[in-house]
Image (cartoon, rainbow, N blue to C red):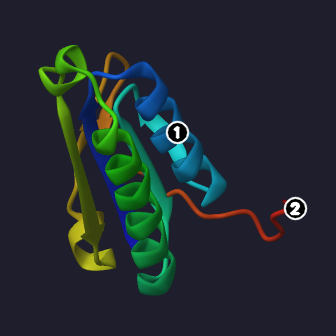
Amino acid sequence: MQTLVVFDIGDNKLRTRIENACMDCGMQRTQFSLFQGELTATRRKKLAKKVENLVNAHTEKESKKQIQQALLIHFFALCSTDFKNTIQINRSATGTVPPIRPPAVVIL
């Protein structure tokens, strides 16, 4: 399923760690605070658990200033029917959103 990870994270270090976790799963950044990619339910759960662990490690030692910063992450799984109904509007055209497929081979 196409998966969207949308976040509002005020802390730069945590945000970078979340971004790296998304990219490690083959997701692509489509906006500053949005990653999109094809993830199975198992891979989505593993990513969510990794993100949760990163957030928990961060919140255990965050400062008073960091507590006041934004920290919100959403995972959205879209079935192919729902994804086909999405609309993209930009400067050059309006149309459907292309799915992001993982590469055939990922070398880690």
Q: Quadrant of residue 1?
A: bottom left
In the figure, is residue 32 to the left or right of 40?
A: left
Q: Quadrant of residue 78?
A: bottom left
Measuring from the top left, give residue 9's x and y in whole percent.
Answer: 28, 30
Tag 2's secondary structure? loop
Q: Which residue is mark 1?
A: 17
Residue 15 in view of the camera = yes
Measuring from the top left, give residue 88's x and y in whole percent.
Answer: 27, 39
Residue 16's place in the image compared with 84, above or below, is above
C-alpha gap between disc 2 and disc 1: 20 Å
Measuring from the top left, give residue 14's x and y in whole percent.
Answer: 43, 33
Measuring from the top left, give residue 11's x and y in whole percent.
Answer: 34, 23
Quadrant that contains the C terminus: bottom right
Hey, what amino acid is under mark 1?
Arg
Residue furthest to the right in view is 107
Tag 1's secondary structure? helix
Hey, what amino acid is under mark 2?
Ile
Task: Indicate which disc residue 56 carries.
Answer: none
Question: Which of 84 and 18 lies nearest the eye of the viewer?
Answer: 18
Task: Indicate which disc residue 107 carries.
Answer: 2
Mark 1 nearby-residue class (10 Å; few <14, some 14–19, many ≥20): some
In the figure, is residue 100 to the left or right of 63?
A: right
